[in-house]
Image (spheres, grey):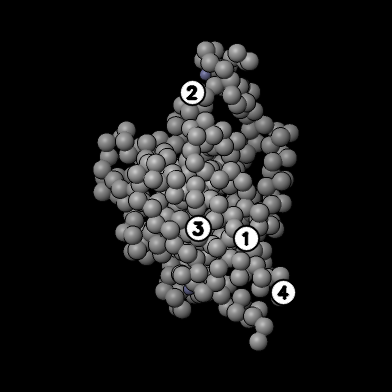
């Protein structure tokens, strides 16, 4: 045995949790993660729910689906799970979709795969071509994120879902918070911590892995031998990459920084929320009718921008 687990002392340590200053074994890791995931599921899932699990085929969304499946088996609650994959049309997605299919058939979960170009007029590779030619206003990731979010909500709604579960981990959450902080978008920050207003058109979100670090989700997905794509999207660019690098660097020098930052920003935002609720009152896009906080939803705004870039 290489090094014994600092928790149980019985098994071999497989991962170092820097924020705790401990190296722990597979069993202790699994217990630690489940202790963070289960309370979210206990709180958010009720009898009769239909949970749409956003499944990209990456490790985090695959692990999320696995936990939903496990929770359904162990909790005795009567709810349904449906996995939804939005295919943006990238080569990267083609690889991860085959993993997603493998996972859903292994777990026996219903799986719906929808092409982004069937919902909107654009696929992500088409957007990429436009951006490479025109004067670009935003990064490809910004377009992709907005299109994917709305596509997911549309498909989940069509499938009768009552909640959408996404695979965002602690690292993603902290990155998003810092990006919103830099942009000064307090209402986006508030939305991350408040229950989304439930309307017939907007399906509320749950994020079971929000308190689990990326390092832990990676090791756990590998240990469980979950079929998943472990690479990062090769098209990822812009602000998110820079913020991620900055935060990773900080974490390395100050172990536990991300966890502490998440907790303190959460505290700060929650104290401010009563005042902020007003700012994200839901409206419906005057063009497409989808839920939005503005007159025109982000998708319709972005479509206009992209259409203006098409050479005549
Ligand atoms: Zn242990
Ligand atoms: Zn719209």
Quadrant for residue 126, please give it. Answer: bottom right
Dot 4: what SS? helix
The mark lying in front, picked from 3 and 4, is: 4
Looking at this view, is 272 or 36 the one in front? 36
Q: CA distance from mark 4 to mark 2?
A: 51 Å
Q: CA distance from mark 3 to mark 1?
A: 27 Å
Location of the C terminus (image quadrant): bottom right
The residue at which mark 1 appears reads as: 141
Q: Residue at x 60, y 26 (%)?
A: 15
* Residue 291, percent from left and from top: 43, 67
Which callout, 2 or 1, points at the residue further toward the start of the chain? 2
Dot 3: what SS? helix
Which callout, 3 or 2, points at the residue further toward the start of the chain? 2
Location of the N terminus (image quadrant): top right
Q: Is mark 2 within 8 Å of ligand 1?
A: yes
The residue at which mark 2 appears reads as: 27
The residue at which mark 4 appears reads as: 133
Q: Is mark 1 within 8 Å of ligand 2?
A: no
Q: Residue at x 44, y 44 (%)?
A: 103
Instruction: Evaluate whether residue 140 shows in this view.
Output: yes
Give the class, few, some or many, for how many residues have Cα within 10 Å of label 3's Cα (few <14, many ≥20): some
The residue at which mark 3 appears reads as: 276
């Amino acid at each position: 045995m290489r090094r014994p687990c600092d928790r149980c002392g019985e098994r071999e340590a497989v991962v170092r949790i820097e924020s705790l200053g401990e190296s722990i074994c597979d069993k202790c890791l699994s217990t630690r993660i489940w202790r963070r995931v289960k309370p979210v599921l206990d709180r958010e899932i009720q009898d009769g729910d239909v949970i749409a699990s956003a499944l990209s085929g990456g490790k985090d969304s695959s692990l999320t689906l696995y936990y939903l499946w496990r929770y359904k088996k162990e909790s005795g609650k009567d709810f349904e799970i449906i996995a939804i994959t939005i295919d943006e049309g990238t080569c990267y997605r083609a690889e991860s979709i085959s993993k997603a299919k493998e996972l859903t058939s292994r777990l026996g979960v219903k799986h719906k795969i929808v092409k982004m170009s069937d919902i909107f007029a654009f696929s992500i590779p088409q957007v990429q071509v436009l951006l490479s030619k025109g004067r670009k206003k935003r990064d490809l990731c910004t377009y992709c994120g907005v299109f994917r979010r709305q596509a997911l909500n549309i498909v989940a709604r069509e499938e009768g879902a009552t909640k959408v579960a996404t695979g965002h981990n602690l690292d993603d959450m902290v990155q998003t918070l810092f990006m919103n902080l830099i942009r000064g978008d307090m209402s986006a920050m508030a939305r991350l911590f408040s229950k989304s207003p439930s309307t017939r058109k907007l399906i509320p979100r749950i994020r079971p892995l929000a308190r689990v670090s990326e390092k832990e989700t990676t090791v756990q997905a590998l240990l469980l031998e979950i079929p998943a794509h472990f690479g990062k999207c090769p098209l990822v660019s812009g602000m998110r990459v820079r913020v991620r690098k900055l935060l990773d660097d900080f974490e390395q020098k100050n172990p536990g920084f991300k966890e502490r930052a998440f907790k303190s920003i959460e505290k700060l935002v929650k104290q401010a929320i009563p005042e902020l609720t007003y700012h994200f009152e839901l409206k419906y896009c005057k063009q497409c009718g989808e839920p939005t906080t503005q007159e025109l939803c982000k998708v319709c705004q972005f479509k206009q921008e992209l259409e203006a870039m098409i050479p005549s």
